[in-house]
Image (tube, rainbow, N blue to C red):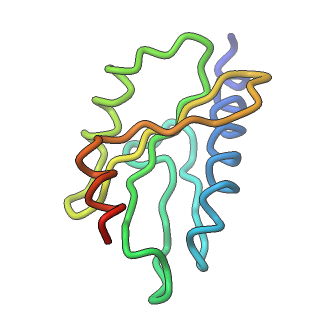
Amino acid sequence: MRTSSAKAKGRRGAQLAAKILQDLYKNKIMIASSGTNGEDLTIVRHPDDLNVVFSVEVKNQEKLNLLDAWGQCVANCPEGSVPLLCHTRNRQEHMFATMRLEDLVRILKR
């Protein structure tokens, strides 16, 4: 796959994740440029937003190595944020999310 095609595919995945997460956040979700270090999605917080800050890594790959992707997600996660890995494949109907079970339980208890 050419670099430009791979970047476009990643950007489509990030745009889909941002669209889905937009319902939780009243302010803007910014998509990082392809190839930059750090989070794929940056959530600009608003006082009325959900009381959780996610650090989002997005993968749009046919064969995803979940443990490697999770390692990247955690490595890019700033302190105080909850790592969230969003992943899908081409022509997949849904986007999936992976997070630590203890983080999910903590969020649901709020």
Percent of width and height locating residue 78: 26, 56
Q: Along the horizontal axis of the image, is 52 left or right of 24?
A: left
Locate residue 5: give its quadrant.
top right
Residue 81, x across and y down, in percent = 29, 60
Which residue is rendered at x = 56% and y = 35% of the image? 96
Q: Quadrant of residue 98?
A: top left
Total label count? 0
Please report the residue visible at 57 percent of the width from the left and 47 percent of the height from the top: 33
Residue 1, above or below 13: above
For image coordinates 49% across by 80% down, the residue present is 49
Q: In this picture, is 79 found above or below 96?
A: below
Quarter of the image for the C terminus: give it: bottom left
**x and y percent of residue 18 in the render?**
63, 55
Please state the horizontal and vertical placement of residue 7, each as a whole percent of the image. 65, 30
Residue under the point 49% across and 87% down: 48
Task: Answer left or right for 93 relative to 43.
Answer: right
Observer-nearest of 77 and 82 = 82
Residue sitting nearer the eye, 9 or 80 = 80
Tell me the quarter of the image containing the N terminus. Answer: top right
Q: Quadrant of residue 23?
A: bottom right
For this rendering, which residue is in front, 70 or 40?
70
State the residue lying farthest toward the front.
109
60, above or below 23, in the image: above
